[in-house]
Image (cartoon, grey):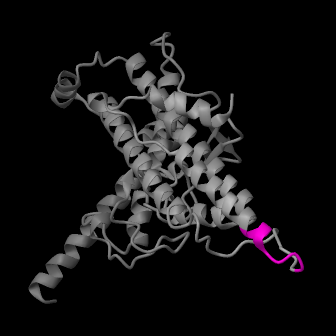
Amino acid sequence: MKFCKKYEEYMEGQLGQNNKKLPRVGLKKLKKILKKCRRCHQSRSVAADTTTVHDTSTCPHQCTVCDGSFFPSLLKEMSEVVGCFNKCAQRLLERHLSSGFRKCLILLKERIQGNHIALVQEGRELVTYAIINAIAMRKILKKYDKVHYSKQGQAFKSQAQSMHIEILQSPWLCELMAFHINLRENKARNEKALALFDGGVLIFNEGKPSLTCELFDSIKLDIDLTCSICLDTVFDPVSLTCGHIFCYICACKGASVTIVDGLQAANHKEKCPLCREEGVYEGAMRLEELNILLSRSCPEYWKERLQTERVERVRLVKEHWDNQCRAFIGV
């Protein structure tokens, strides 16, 4: 079965809240656009003067036939898919991490049993939704380049990554991977626990941790969990909107803000320490599932690091309020 047919069948069976269909990549529509473009190029080639050699190995930077509808349509669909995935993953993980009276309210509102099996099943569906849409995007961009003998599809993919609408770049996917491993480690307590996907593991290479997961269709995720500022395992990890992960304190230092003010107070012109992209701090996201996973995986180191971090946070808070008092009295 061709991927397009398999994709359409899968998406037809996916329903979100209120039984509404989830956003998807319109593969059939986009393929029709490319097919029309190919016919136009062929007709122009036939109509050309026979004495003129028609070079089919190159393509203009812009295609008048399909660029006006192909890329804008794909961009809109990618944005909708990523937005839907992020929203659903956030809602799922909030249920898992909530406690006390708030958890009771959430469970009552959404009418679920609150056991691990229900959470893992929903997580499995979310990961599958993310992966199959990522494959669909890659295949249609590859087809675009094949039709046009160009690299505009790959350039668009890079543009999508810079716009943070590449679904495999989403920090919520990293959180779901950590969520899966956390539940898998609780299998002794709940033997009926299911797996989100095979191969998701936390590995340590020479003391440096990373999240690794091999997905189908040759897609592999490898997320480095070493903070590039302190060069240590990320503690209280936070993901910037560009996708890079740092310790919370290190991210605050990189944004030139105090831990009291938080990353939301960062200047829009502050850049990511790695990729130098501006405006990445305002939408920064705390990776709580990842923090739980790391604390369970290396408990002795985590206990020592926790004591060090507490001392450092007390020092930074004291320094912040000392500066505020001096500014207030004009010293």
Figure label count: 0
**Above or below — where is 294 with respect to 224?**
above
State left or right for residue 257 relative to residue 209: left
Q: Which image quadrant: the N terminus?
A: top right
Q: Nearer the viewer, residue 156 or 88?
A: 156
In this view of the protein, can residue 240 be seen by the observer? Answer: yes
Q: Nearer the viewer, residue 113 or 46?
A: 46
**Above or below — where is 219 with respect to 115?**
below
Q: Residue at x 33, y 59 (%)?
A: 313
User: Where residue 105 sits in the image (x, y, percent)?
Assistant: 16, 27
Residues in magenta, as a range: 44-51
Q: Quadrant of residue 316?
A: bottom left
User: Where residue 206 sits in the image (x, y, percent)?
Assistant: 71, 48
Q: Nearer the viewer, residue 107 or 41?
A: 41
**Above or below — where is 120 with respect to 207?**
above
Judge whether residue 143 is colored magenta.
no
Q: Residue at x 55, y 70 (%)?
A: 275
Q: Which image quadrant: the C terminus?
A: bottom left
User: Where residue 283 sits in the image (x, y, percent)?
Assistant: 35, 60
In this view of the protein, can residue 306 be seen by the observer? Answer: no
